[in-house]
């Protein structure tokens, strides 16, 4: 089941399962900017990552004297949300802690995800409420995949990413078990443009922990169109695709995969947010389409 909102610029659809964005279509040009989840390549569109980002060592963490099991990127993307609010230009989906979530994550919470159209941009707001009596450690992030097919004959090599600021940054490489290794590899040296190539993700995602930019644009040498992801306040950024696949993910994160050698304690996980009881954490990112 999916819900759709539209205005004179964009038509946007979201599924209740995972509260996952599944379409960003330009009303003017008809271009579908979101990856359409080909199961033969990557069967998702734009998962929401909660209550962890990335992978845990051995898919488990320690809390309150015991081990808890949780798969990569958490459980929210695999669960049905309820519709909390729906209007002509926005909707809000909600996930509340339950006996099912407590088997993986022993905290009372409400996760609300609001999608709002504002002209030619889509605003996505996460609200995380701690309904428990103890500090709640969590991470949250977005994982939208954007199509590299804006016109006939488009190739991956026609596209590039443009950072808001000139960057000298390295990616933190993932090891064999998809944990953050100590190995880094330089990606940009005082540059703003990152050309896309079929082999750019041969070593998995590009993971940036010390970038300056809070805005990254997907651009094409063949088209005047531009898609920009703005992520003020998000400290980490992932860029990813399956090797040689015609899409690219631009992923704002609070948190990332466990580093190799991590002690396994959730409260010590790098990038973790520690939310006090009865408190709400809010963050927003925006997707802007220019044609």
Image (cartoon, grey):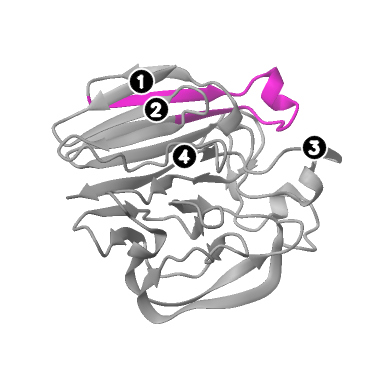
In primary-sequence order, the first of circles 2 and 3 is: 2
Check disc 1: other Cα within 10 Å, few if <14, some if 14-19, many if 20+: some
Q: Residue 121 vs residue 107: left or right?
A: left
Which quarter of the image is occupied by the N terminus?
A: top left
> What x and y, as percent, mark residue 286?
32, 46
Name the residue rendered at 33%, 58% in the picture.
Answer: 218
Residue 68 has which mark? Answer: 3
* Viewer-side label of 3, 4: 4
Residue designated by label 1: 3
Residue 152, placed above or below residue 113: below
SS assignment at label 1: strand
Q: Where's residue 183, x and y in %?
A: 68, 74
Residue nearest the observer in this picture, 155 or 67: 155
Work out whether mark 3 precedes mark 1 in sequence or the reverse, and give the earlier one: 1
When the figure is inspected, residue 207 is found, relative to residue 67, above or below; the finding is below
Please name the residue that numbered disc 4 is placed on.
46
Residue 110 painted magenta:
yes
Query: Of the residues under marks 2 and 1, which one precedes in the sequence?
Result: 1
Against 279, residue 169 (above or below) is: below
Callout count: 4
Tell me if I can see residue 13 in this picture: yes
Q: Give the class, few, some or many, for how many residues have Cα within 10 Å of label 2's Cα (few <14, many ≥20).
A: many
The region drawn magenta spans 89-112
Which residue was labeled with disc 2? 14
């Amino acid at each position: 089941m999916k819900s759709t909102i539209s205005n004179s610029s964009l038509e946007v659809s979201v599924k209740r399962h995972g509260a996952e964005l599944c379409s960003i279509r330009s009303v003017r040009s008809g271009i579908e900017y979101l990856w359409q989840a080909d199961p033969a390549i990557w069967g998702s569109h734009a998962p929401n990552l909660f209550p962890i980002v990335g992978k845990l060592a051995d898919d488990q963490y320690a809390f309150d004297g015991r081990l808890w099991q949780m798969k990569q990127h958490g459980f929210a993307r695999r669960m049905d949300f309820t519709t909390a609010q729906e209007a002509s230009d926005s909707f809000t989906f909600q996930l509340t802690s339950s006996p099912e979530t407590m088997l993986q994550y022993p905290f009372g919470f409400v996760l609300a995800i609001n999608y709002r159209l504002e002209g030619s941009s889509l605003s996505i707001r996460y609200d995380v409420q701690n309904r428990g009596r103890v500090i709640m450690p969590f991470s949250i992030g977005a994982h939208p995949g954007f199509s590299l097919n804006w016109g006939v004959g488009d190739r991956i090599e026609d596209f590039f990413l443009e950072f808001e600021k000139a960057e000298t940054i390295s990616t933190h490489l993932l090891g064999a078990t998809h944990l953050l290794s100590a190995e880094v590899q330089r990606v940009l040296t005082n540059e703003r443009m990152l050309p896309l190539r079929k082999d750019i993700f041969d070593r998995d995602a590009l993971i940036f922990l010390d970038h300056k930019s809070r805005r990254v644009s997907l651009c094409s040498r063949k088209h005047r169109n531009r898609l920009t992801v703005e992520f003020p306040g998000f400290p980490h950024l992932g860029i990813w695709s399956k090797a040689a696949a015609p899409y690219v993910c631009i992923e704002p994160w609070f948190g990332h995969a466990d580093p190799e050698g991590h002690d396994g304690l959730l409260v010590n996980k790098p990038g973790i947010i520690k939310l006090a009881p009865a408190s709400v954490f809010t963050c927003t990112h925006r997707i802007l389409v220019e044609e």
